Image (tube, rainbow, N blue to C red):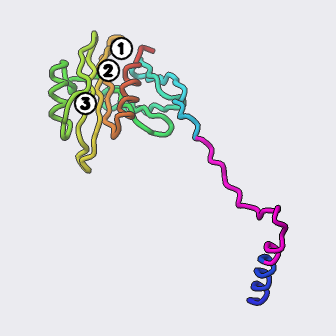
Amino acid sequence: MKNVLLLACLALVACKKDAPADVKAAEPVKEVAKAPEAARPAAAAWVNLEKLGAKIEMPAGSKADDTSADAPNYSVAPQDYAYTVMVSTVTEAYASSWEAAVEEVKKNTNGFKAFSKNEKTADGWILEFEGESLMDKAPLYGVLLRKKIGDRSIECARNEPSKDSRDAVAKACASLAKL
């Protein structure tokens, strides 16, 4: 068997050696790298939060899970779970004022660093902030939005590991509207 392989290799070399000068040996075909398609944001769609009488704009295909306990609450996430939005009915367990919410964020955010947004609104507030993960000390980016939908105060919040995810949560929270 070794002899057959050796003869085959020698024959290939001889053929290549005897080939006319104007005939070039075939070069391996190089794969042409395709340029990655530009990342396009998923089309937006409204997700109804029936028990809250509200809706939230999220990527198409997002699902809302009813997480109600003592009051109507939802966990909403896109299909790829790139981030999650927590939408809750405000009860007496929540901060009752913007000042109290600011202090709660400072106190309850591990490794609190700073607010990147700290604004009162006509019917609530929007807080965006940075802290660090309790487990691995990685950066943590949070958002907490309070607004009134109909006669109900709703809080929309989440801590995420990246600014992009936090910004997606903030955008979704800002979209909250009456059904």
72 on left or right of 44: left
- In the image, which disc is placed on residue 149? 1
Q: Label 2: which residue?
A: 154
Looking at the image, is 136 positioned above or below residue 41? below
Which of the two marks, 1 or 3, is nearer to us in this view?
Answer: 3
The foreground one among 131 and 18 is 18
| 19 within the magenta span | yes
Report which quarter residue 94 is drawn in: top left
The residue stretch that appears in magenta: 14-35
Mark 3 neighbour class, 10 Å CA radius: few under 14, some 14 to 19, many 20 or more: many
**In the displayed structure image, the side of residue 157 where residue 41 appears, left or right:** right
Q: Please name which of the two marks, 2 or 3, marks the residue nearer to the observer.
A: 3
Q: Are marks 2 and 1 in contact (CB under 8 Å)?
A: yes
Please tell me which of labels 1 and 3 falls first in the chain. Answer: 3
Q: Is residue 145 magenta?
A: no
Q: Which amino acid type corresponds to the residue marked 2 in the rendered image?
A: Ile
In which quadrant will I find the N terminus? bottom right
Q: Are marks 1 and 3 in contact (CB under 8 Å)?
A: no
Q: Residue at x 44, y 34 (%)?
A: 77
For the residues marked 2 and 3, what is the alpha-carbon distance in whole angstroms?
19 Å
Q: Within the image, what quadrant is residue 27 found in?
A: bottom right
Please state which amino acid type lies under the numbered disc 1: Ile
Using the rendered view, name the quadrant where residue 143 is placed: top left
Badge number at residue 129: 3
Q: Position of residue 67 (x, y in %)?
A: 37, 33
Element under disc 3: strand
Distance from disc 1 to disc 3, alpha carbons, whole Å, reads 24 Å
Question: Residue 173: x, y in percent?
Answer: 37, 23
Q: Residue at x 31, y 16 (%)?
A: 147
Across and down, in percent, residue 153 comes to: 30, 17
Residue at the (71%, 57%) spot, across then down: 29
